[in-house]
Amino acid sequence: MRISTRFSDAIHLICFLDIYQNQKLTSDFIASSIQTSPVMVRQIMIQLRKAGLLKTTKGTANPQITRPLDEISLYDVYLAIEEASGPHPLFEIDYDTNPNCIVGGNIQGVLENFYEDAKQAAMAKLQQRTIADVVNQIKISQSKKELKQRQEL
Protein backbone atom coordinates (compact mmCIF):
# COMPACT_ATOMS: atom_id res chain seq x y z
CA MET A 1 0.00 0.00 0.00
CA ARG A 2 1.33 3.41 -0.97
CA ILE A 3 1.03 6.10 1.68
CA SER A 4 -0.55 9.34 0.51
CA THR A 5 1.54 12.50 0.49
CA ARG A 6 -1.43 14.77 -0.27
CA PHE A 7 -1.48 16.18 3.28
CA SER A 8 2.21 17.05 3.12
CA ASP A 9 1.76 18.42 -0.40
CA ALA A 10 -1.15 20.61 0.73
CA ILE A 11 0.92 22.10 3.57
CA HIS A 12 3.76 22.63 1.08
CA LEU A 13 1.37 24.36 -1.33
CA ILE A 14 0.01 26.80 1.26
CA CYS A 15 3.52 27.66 2.49
CA PHE A 16 4.62 28.16 -1.13
CA LEU A 17 1.70 30.53 -1.76
CA ASP A 18 2.74 32.62 1.22
CA ILE A 19 6.47 32.71 0.53
CA TYR A 20 6.06 33.38 -3.21
CA GLN A 21 2.96 35.56 -2.93
CA ASN A 22 4.43 38.35 -5.07
CA GLN A 23 4.97 36.08 -8.06
CA LYS A 24 2.69 34.60 -10.68
CA LEU A 25 1.52 31.42 -8.98
CA THR A 26 0.66 29.01 -11.77
CA SER A 27 -0.02 25.36 -11.04
CA ASP A 28 3.11 24.57 -13.10
CA PHE A 29 5.25 26.81 -10.87
CA ILE A 30 3.81 25.31 -7.67
CA ALA A 31 4.15 21.77 -9.07
CA SER A 32 7.84 22.38 -9.77
CA SER A 33 8.43 22.87 -6.05
CA ILE A 34 6.34 19.92 -4.90
CA GLN A 35 7.67 17.81 -7.79
CA THR A 36 4.24 16.64 -8.78
CA SER A 37 1.94 17.30 -11.70
CA PRO A 38 0.06 20.57 -12.20
CA VAL A 39 -3.12 18.47 -12.27
CA MET A 40 -2.39 17.23 -8.74
CA VAL A 41 -1.75 20.81 -7.61
CA ARG A 42 -5.10 21.90 -9.02
CA GLN A 43 -6.86 18.97 -7.30
CA ILE A 44 -5.33 19.91 -3.96
CA MET A 45 -6.26 23.56 -4.49
CA ILE A 46 -9.86 22.54 -5.19
CA GLN A 47 -9.99 20.67 -1.87
CA LEU A 48 -8.41 23.60 -0.01
CA ARG A 49 -10.88 25.98 -1.68
CA LYS A 50 -13.84 23.79 -0.70
CA ALA A 51 -12.58 23.85 2.89
CA GLY A 52 -12.41 27.65 2.79
CA LEU A 53 -8.62 27.82 3.09
CA LEU A 54 -7.96 29.14 -0.44
CA LYS A 55 -9.63 31.51 -2.81
CA THR A 56 -9.07 30.89 -6.51
CA THR A 57 -10.32 32.53 -9.67
CA LYS A 58 -10.68 30.29 -12.68
CA GLY A 59 -8.28 31.20 -15.46
CA THR A 60 -5.94 33.27 -13.29
CA ALA A 61 -2.68 32.36 -11.56
CA ASN A 62 -3.51 34.10 -8.32
CA PRO A 63 -4.62 31.67 -5.58
CA GLN A 64 -4.95 33.40 -2.24
CA ILE A 65 -4.90 32.12 1.33
CA THR A 66 -8.15 33.17 3.01
CA ARG A 67 -6.98 33.49 6.61
CA PRO A 68 -3.87 34.56 8.46
CA LEU A 69 -1.38 31.68 8.62
CA ASP A 70 -1.53 31.56 12.40
CA GLU A 71 -5.26 30.82 12.13
CA ILE A 72 -4.82 27.77 9.88
CA SER A 73 -3.91 24.69 11.88
CA LEU A 74 -2.33 21.64 10.36
CA TYR A 75 -5.49 19.86 11.49
CA ASP A 76 -7.55 22.22 9.28
CA VAL A 77 -5.41 21.18 6.31
CA TYR A 78 -5.64 17.50 7.31
CA LEU A 79 -9.43 17.70 7.37
CA ALA A 80 -9.50 19.48 4.00
CA ILE A 81 -7.29 16.90 2.32
CA GLU A 82 -7.50 13.54 4.05
CA GLU A 83 -11.03 13.62 5.40
CA ALA A 84 -12.61 15.24 2.33
CA SER A 85 -12.97 11.91 0.55
CA GLY A 86 -14.03 10.05 3.67
CA PRO A 87 -12.10 9.13 6.79
CA HIS A 88 -8.84 7.28 6.24
CA PRO A 89 -7.15 5.37 9.02
CA LEU A 90 -3.90 6.84 10.23
CA PHE A 91 -2.57 3.30 10.68
CA GLU A 92 -3.60 0.12 8.89
CA ILE A 93 -4.18 -3.18 10.67
CA ASP A 94 -3.62 -6.49 8.92
CA TYR A 95 -6.80 -8.48 9.49
CA ASP A 96 -5.64 -11.41 7.38
CA THR A 97 -3.97 -13.35 10.18
CA ASN A 98 -4.42 -16.82 11.65
CA PRO A 99 -7.40 -16.67 14.03
CA ASN A 100 -6.26 -19.93 15.70
CA CYS A 101 -2.95 -18.36 16.78
CA ILE A 102 -2.78 -16.52 20.12
CA VAL A 103 -1.21 -13.50 18.41
CA GLY A 104 -3.05 -13.71 15.09
CA GLY A 105 -6.43 -14.12 16.80
CA ASN A 106 -6.06 -11.21 19.22
CA ILE A 107 -3.70 -8.60 17.84
CA GLN A 108 -6.23 -6.63 15.79
CA GLY A 109 -8.35 -5.59 18.79
CA VAL A 110 -5.29 -4.69 20.82
CA LEU A 111 -3.79 -2.63 17.99
CA GLU A 112 -7.12 -0.90 17.30
CA ASN A 113 -7.03 0.54 20.84
CA PHE A 114 -3.37 1.52 20.65
CA TYR A 115 -3.78 3.05 17.20
CA GLU A 116 -6.85 5.03 18.27
CA ASP A 117 -4.91 6.50 21.20
CA ALA A 118 -2.04 7.42 18.87
CA LYS A 119 -4.44 8.97 16.35
CA GLN A 120 -6.08 11.13 19.04
CA ALA A 121 -2.66 12.33 20.23
CA ALA A 122 -1.58 13.11 16.65
CA MET A 123 -4.79 15.03 15.89
CA ALA A 124 -4.39 17.07 19.09
CA LYS A 125 -0.82 17.95 18.09
CA LEU A 126 -1.94 18.94 14.57
CA GLN A 127 -4.49 21.31 16.14
CA GLN A 128 -1.69 23.03 18.07
CA ARG A 129 0.56 23.64 15.05
CA THR A 130 -0.21 26.23 12.39
CA ILE A 131 0.91 27.01 8.88
CA ALA A 132 2.68 30.03 10.39
CA ASP A 133 4.79 27.62 12.47
CA VAL A 134 5.77 25.74 9.31
CA VAL A 135 6.61 28.90 7.34
CA ASN A 136 8.69 30.23 10.24
CA GLN A 137 10.66 26.98 10.44
CA ILE A 138 11.20 27.00 6.66
CA LYS A 139 12.63 30.52 6.91
CA ILE A 140 14.87 29.55 9.83
CA SER A 141 16.14 26.49 7.91
CA GLN A 142 16.84 28.62 4.85
CA SER A 143 18.71 31.23 6.91
CA LYS A 144 20.86 28.49 8.44
CA LYS A 145 21.66 27.08 4.98
CA GLU A 146 22.60 30.51 3.68
CA LEU A 147 24.80 31.20 6.71
CA LYS A 148 26.56 27.85 6.28
CA GLN A 149 27.13 28.55 2.57
CA ARG A 150 28.67 31.95 3.37
CA GLN A 151 30.90 30.37 5.99
CA GLU A 152 32.12 27.78 3.50
CA LEU A 153 33.28 30.48 1.07
Image: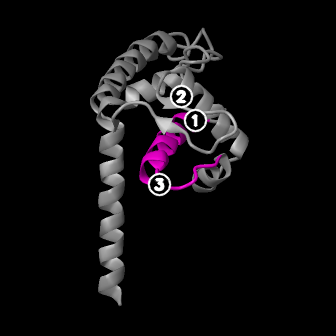
- Which amino acid type is shown beneath numbered disc 2? Leu
Q: Secondary structure at mark 3?
A: loop
Q: Which residues are magenta?
A: 3-26
> In the image, is residue 99 part of the stretch drawn in magenta?
no
Disc 3 crowd rating (10 Å Cα; few below 14, some 14-19, many 20+) is few
Please state which of residues 117 and 132 is positioned toward the viewer in this rendering: 132
Q: Earlier in the sequence, mark 3 or mark 2?
A: 3
Residue 118, percent across and down? 36, 23
Q: Residue at x 36, y 23 (%)?
A: 123
Give SS at disc 1: helix
Say if the magenta span includes residue 25: yes
Give me the residue at 35% from left, 70% from top. Answer: 145
Quarter of the figure that contains the N terminus: top right
Quadrant where the C terminus lies? bottom left
Where is residue 131? Give x, y as percent. Answer: 36, 39
Residue 48 circle label: 2
Q: Is residue 16 above or below residue 47?
A: below
For mark 2, does the 10 Å Cα neighbourhood hold few (<14), some (14 to 19), or many (20 or more) residues?
many
Q: Position of residue 34 (x, y in %)?
A: 58, 50
- State left or right for residue 145 relative to residue 106: left
Tags 1 and 3 touching, CB below 8 Å: no
Residue 136 place in picture, x, y as percent: 30, 50
Of badges 2 and 1, nearer the viewer stands: 2
Q: Nearer the viewer, residue 150 or 60?
A: 60
Measured in 3D between alpha carbons, the distance from the residue under mark 1 to the one under mark 3, in whole angstroms, is 25 Å
Q: Quadrant of residue 82?
A: top right
Amino acid beneath label 3: Asn
* Callout 3–callout 2 Cβ contact below 8 Å: no
Sequence-first tag of 1 and 3: 1
The kind of secondary structure element at disc 2 is helix
Q: What's the mark number on residue 22?
A: 3
What numbered label is drawn on residue 6?
A: 1
